[in-house]
Every structure is written in structure tokens, then in C-alpha cells.
Image: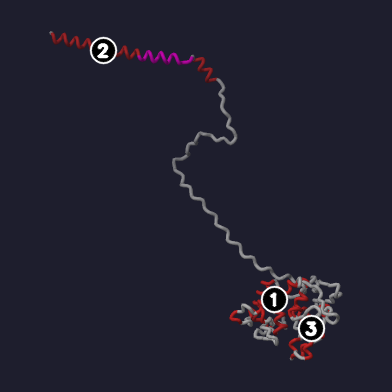
């Protein structure tokens, strides 16, 4: 009986405890609902807020959105490749030497220069012993038979010439003896701004294009340069064709420049002519030493003979010139 009473008491206590907990839980829920009810707006207010026009900030130009776009794919992009360095441009080629000035006279096949001191140039298309495209012999020799040589002023580009490469193709051209040295004349002529045919013409007049030739006063080789110009010759061999032609080309260019570009005077100077020269001085070799003479026909043979690819010793059965003072030299 006691046991039954105890069990009843325990059961009663358990029921009372459960009810108390339930009441406490309901009390908490009620409190929470009360708090929510205080914050809840009336339905009309909610409707008014929802229907009210919204204000949004306009994007300013240049302003980027802070919203990140979702990737369109889950595939990872390949890693960025390093920028390819542009290839450096190749170094600029060295400037080529300036070509010699064109020499074709006035375009009508005649020299275009005139000099008031010496009168009309007397140029003729036909070559005769005392005239030709580059002027009459007496004009080239202006003053020679008077008060002394006083050459007309002519520039290289005023002359009528043919190219050396063209000249050697002509039948009967005067440069047959020079055929082994054409490339050297071309190279040194172009390097020094001198028409190559002028260098070949010097070689023909001075040595008949014989590289072993030594003059009566010791002049050396093809260009008959004096010994003072032989410095730097390979193996001290001033007769070496490449060195000899190069030295002759440089000397002529220096002479031409020093005379202000007067090619008539520069060519005469190469053969020993000088302003004021007269036949009495030029032909002094008649009285003794033949090799001290100046060739009185030098300018006519050079300008109206070799520069036209004409053999001045025999053109149409005639010789160019009128003095022929070197005949005594044999």
C-alpha cells in the first residue's frame, strides 16, 4: 500500500512538472509574439512603401559596376601567355658612296658650259682632230698660245662622256689594254665620285694601261703617280694595280676639289699643265730632255677622244690634236 502511495505521489509530481514547463514555454512564445507585433507595420503602410516610386543613382560616365558577372562556364581560362617581344629591326645598311655626277652635257650631245673669257666653246657632234662634243681644242687650251693657259671653268656634270662599261663594248674602243682592270677603275671611281672612264683615260694617256710602266722621272704604274704618293703600298709595291689606281683616283679628286670643281684645269694639272703655261715652256723637251715636256694635245685627246670611247691615235684615219710634240720621245 505504501508502495502504491509513493508511486502516486511520484506520478503527480511528474505531471505537475510537465505542466509547468509547458506553461513556461507558452509564456516565451507569447512574449516573442508580442515583440514581433510591436514591430509589424500596418498593411496599408506596407502597400504604400511597395507602390512608391524607387530612386536609383544613375551611373556616372566611366564608372564601372561593382557587381561581378557570373562566369559563363566553369572551365578555367588558359593561363595568360607572356607578351611576345617584337623583333628588333635589322641595323640600317651603311650608306653607299655617292655615285659620280652624271656627265651628259646639255642633253643634245654637246657640252653645256661656256666661259666668257674664252669665247664660244666651239663644240661639235662630229669628232675632228681639233674639235668634238666637249669643245674646240683652242677653247680647252684657252690662252695657251697667247699670254698663257687660262682654262675655261667646266664642272664634271657639264661634260659629254660615255660610261666605261659602255665604252668597252664598242668595237675598236681604245681601252683594250685596260680590260683586266675595269672592275678596279669602277670601284675606285665610284668610291671617289669620279667617272670611272676618266680614271681609265688617265691610265691610257699616262702608261698605255701598262701596270709595270715606270716613267722617266720615276712615275709609277698605271696612273704614273709620283713616288711621294706610294706610302702604304702593299709590300712597298707601288705598281700594284689596285693600290696604284686608288692612289691616282684620290689624288685627282683632291686636285679637283682644290680647284673648285674645274675639271678642265684638274685634268691638265694631272699631266703637269699649270695656269700660264705656254708652248715655249711646254715643249722645252725639244731642246734636250724629252720627258720634261707637256703633251700639247693632252686635253683634246682626253675630252674629245677617250671620254667618247675614241682612239685618239687613229680616228677615221686621223690623229687628234695639232702639236704632236711627243713624237720626239719615240
Question: Residue 117: image x %, image y %?
Answer: 86, 74
> Which range is magenta?
28-41
How many numbered marks, from 0 up? 3
| Quadrant showing the N terminus | top left
Pointer 1: what residue?
A: 251
The secondary structure type at the circle numbered 3 is: loop
How many angstroms separate mark 2 from mark 1 (CA)?
135 Å
Pointer 2: what residue?
A: 17
How many angstroms separate mark 3 from mark 2 (CA)?
153 Å
Question: Residue 304: image x %, image y %?
Answer: 78, 79
Mark 1, Cα crowd under 10 Å, few <14 / some 14-19 / many 20+, is some
Judged left or right of residue 184, residue 111 is right
- Identified at 25% across, 10% down, the residue is 16
Q: Are marks 1 and 3 in contact (CB under 8 Å)?
A: no
Counting residues from the start of the chain, the first of labels 2 and 1 encountered is 2
Pointer 3: what residue?
A: 297
Amino acid at each position: 500500500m505504501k508502495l502504491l502511495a509513493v508511486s502516486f505521489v511520484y506520478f503527480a509530481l511528474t505531471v505537475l512538472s510537465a505542466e509547468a514547463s509547458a506553461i513556461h514555454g507558452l509564456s516565451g512564445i507569447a512574449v516573442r509574439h508580442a515583440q514581433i507585433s510591436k514591430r509589424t507595420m500596418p498593411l496599408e503602410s506596407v502597400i504604400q512603401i511597395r507602390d512608391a516610386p524607387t530612386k536609383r543613382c544613375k551611373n556616372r560616365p566611366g564608372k564601372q559596376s561593382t557587381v561581378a558577372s557570373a562566369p559563363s562556364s566553369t572551365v578555367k581560362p588558359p593561363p595568360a601567355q607572356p607578351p611576345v617581344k617584337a623583333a628588333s629591326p635589322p641595323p640600317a645598311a651603311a650608306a653607299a658612296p655617292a655615285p659620280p655626277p652624271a656627265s651628259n652635257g646639255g642633253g643634245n650631245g654637246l657640252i653645256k658650259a661656256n666661259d666668257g673669257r674664252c669665247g664660244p666653246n666651239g663644240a661639235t657632234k662630229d669628232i675632228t682632230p681639233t674639235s668634238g662634243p666637249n669643245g674646240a681644242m683652242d677653247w680647252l687650251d684657252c690662252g695657251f698660245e697667247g699670254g698663257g693657259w687660262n682654262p675655261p671653268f667646266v664642272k664634271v656634270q657639264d661634260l659629254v662622256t660615255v660610261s666605261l662599261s659602255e665604252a668597252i663594248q664598242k668595237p675598236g674602243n681604245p681601252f683594250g689594254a685596260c680590260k683586266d682592270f675595269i672592275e678596279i677603275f669602277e670601284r675606285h671611281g665610284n668610291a671617289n665620285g669620279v667617272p670611272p672612264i676618266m680614271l681609265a683615260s688617265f691610265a691610257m694617256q699616262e702608261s698605255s694601261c701598262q701596270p709595270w710602266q715606270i716613267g722617266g722621272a720615276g712615275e709609277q704604274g698605271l696612273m704614273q703617280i709620283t713616288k711621294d704618293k706610294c706610302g702604304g703600298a702593299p709590300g712597298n709595291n707601288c705598281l700594284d694595280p689596285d693600290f696604284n689606281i686608288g692612289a691616282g683616283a684620290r689624288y685627282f679628286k683632291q686636285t679637283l676639289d682644290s680647284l673648285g670643281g674645274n675639271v678642265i684645269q684638274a685634268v691638265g694639272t694631272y699631266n703637269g699643265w699649270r695656269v700660264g703655261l705656254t708652248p715655249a715652256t711646254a715643249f722645252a723637251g725639244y731642246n734636250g730632255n724629252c720627258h720634261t715636256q707637256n703633251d700639247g694635245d693632252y686635253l683634246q685627246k682626253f675630252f674629245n677622244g677617250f671620254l667618247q670611247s675614241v682612239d685618239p691615235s687613229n680616228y677615221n684615219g686621223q690623229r687628234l690634236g695639232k702639236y704632236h710634240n711627243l713624237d720626239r720621245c719615240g
